[in-house]
Image: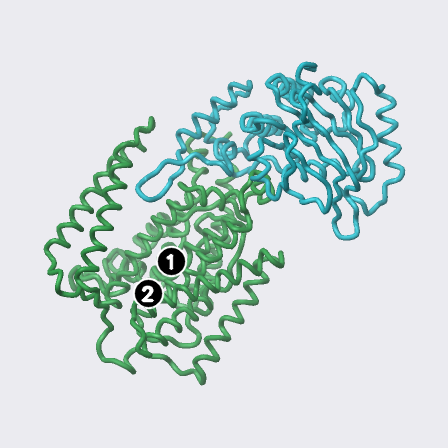
Chain colours: A green, B cyan
Amino acid sequence: MANPISQRLARHPEAGAFVGFIAVFLFFAALTPDTFLSGRSAASVLTSQAIPGIVALGVALLMISGEFDLSVGSILGVASLVFLELATHEVSPLAAASAGVAAGCFMGLINGLLLVWTRIPSFIITLGTLLVFRAICLTAISGGRIVRWSDVSRTDPVVLVPGLVTLALCIAVAVVLLWTARDLGRYRPQNRFTLGLSRLGAGGCLLAAVAVLGWSLGADIFEPWVIDLFGVLNGRIDIGAAAGNFRMSIIWWLVLAALFHLLLTRTRFGNAVFATGGHGEAARAQGVDVDRTRVISFVICGGLAALAGVLQVCRLKSVDPLRGEGLELEVIAAVVIGGTLLKGGYGSIIGAVVGTALTGMLRTGLVLSGVPSNAFRGAIGALVIIAVIINTLVRRQR
Amino acid sequence: MNPALKNDSPAPLVQLQDIDVGFGHIRALEGACLELHAGEVVALLGDNGAGKSTLIKVLTGLVRPQAGDIRVNGESLTLASPSQARKQGIEAVYQDLALVPLMSIARNFFLGRELTRSVGPVRLLDEEEMDRQASRALVQIGIQVRDTSEPVEGLSGGERQSIAIGRAVHFGSKVLILDEPTSALSIGETEKVLQYVEAARARGLGVILITHNLDHVYKVSDRLVILSQGKTIANLPVEQIEHEEAARLIMSGAGRKTPSERE
């Protein structure tokens, strides 16, 4: 008989990954405490995993909707190329970045429409588009050339936002924050935990609104706001020289994870995603537009892969034709380790984050303990199988 | 049955006339007809492949007919999607498409019409309200569940079927369609389902019951409609047709069934 605690745990797809995370952490902490338990190794894990981590958010959402995207690595490559090619050809860097993300959404749309029009399994469709999208990179950057930002400029690009536009943006953000704070403050749920969380959220929104307004009032409205685009998107976070290489992509990864967790668990769209993956025909009979849900999930998955590519370019400042190759398998492994079911209908964004962090930690830990780096792939493979066995056992407790 | 509610109203609740549906070379329905009045239970009968499920899928917007007329309250309309049918107050419980197993009872109950609350510019699910309303609605129909946030996966077949029926009764303002609701149930659970049917009729709903069990038909139905090879071959009040005669009509269709025909 299952006990209530394991039953409650089993309602959280990420439970197994959490346990695995702690186990792997303790193992390496005991094995190589001096090097593993340091800011540097934490930075190494988080910075290296932020990019696949962002891709994994979309892959997890899509997998929960019952579909599969093998083309994310190629989408990341094309989006990176679109961004840097445009930026190095005198297109405004912000527009170039947006075009990169839009290209990813468009490629996701192609995957989604091919799925609902042909009813061919998404595994096959995206196996095809993996090759097609990769061919775009390979033909656009002929002869193994590498596109580099440093070929056109020695300084990083900046975005100039006119002072009045900045002010208007700040006011708009503050209004939305105050509006959210008001609605959260008025919510009176029975559940004390939810109530506390709402109150906390309301307070946080209020403080953020005050901060934004304060900052905008202090700024000179006749001076443009200068944004270092590479820095904001994926620059180094300065928290002391000894702390290690923490990058902005970690922040974006966590912010996006929070947003997509909310989208998946607290919105009608999220419910449609779970229902489409869990039992598509039953969902359709209840009026859920399952095809629309599938297409939107593909667009989100493509958009997130593209965004990850754009963020990566902001750090590496170059694109090669094989950018993102092999990423799809690493990401799918992380999502599966995070407890998401391959057949859909069950899984979580938190699980995808923990799964991605776990694979990164395993890599860093193995390197620090002197294991040849090629053994890492084998370790990940073993971990996927162990994780699926554990997740299946945990799920049986339900 | 409730005679006051039957045939006195000028227009039937639902009227399907000369419905044609084909899937490729297969003719699933050829000029099928069905009529349903408020406060009436119609048993839709026929052998496997007769077109029963296809006919109700037409009525629930899952299948679009190539020809024929659909009238709801006398008004001719097209039902292009399940949500359009639901807007007309037509709810169905399918034998195999009832609930999403990995989702909670409350989320299944409100699937496709989730309750939300505004938080700033976005709308978030109001889970507490959905839990509360789902358990209240289920208790009202006589279904006891331990916890509506529990996934459906852990429930028995009977419990799942009652929740699906409870949902349809709760939201179905006019027409309740039950496709083989008792096929996988124990005797006790079957009795309960038949009680739900009678309760729905008492509330003035029109009920279409698809079943292979003629005993259940004679227990709760007011009228029989028999399909054979996609055509309506009988439409009679139960008191005008004997049990054996109905069985003979259903089976005589079976002999003419082509092997490739399917519902």
Q: Is residue A133 above or below residue A304?
A: below
Who's the residue at 62% across and 56% down the image? Answer: A119
CB of mark 2 within 8 Å of CB of mark 1? yes
Number of other residues with Cα within 10 Å of mark 2, as a class: few under 14, some 14 to 19, many 20 or more: many
**SS state under label 2:** helix
Q: Which residue is mark 1?
A: A54
A63 or A187: nearer the viewer: A187
Same chain, marks 2 and 1? yes
Q: Position of residue A46 (x, y in %)?
A: 31, 58
> Does residue A327 show up?
yes
Q: Which residue is mark 2?
A: A311
Q: Earlier in the sequence, mark 2 or mark 1?
A: 1
Instruction: Name the residue type under label 2.
Output: Leu
Q: Position of residue B164 (x, y in %)?
A: 58, 30
Among the 4 quarters of the image, the one containing residue A266: top left
Number of other residues with Cα within 10 Å of mark 1, as a class: few under 14, some 14 to 19, many 20 or more: many
Q: Position of residue A85 (x, y in %)?
A: 37, 76
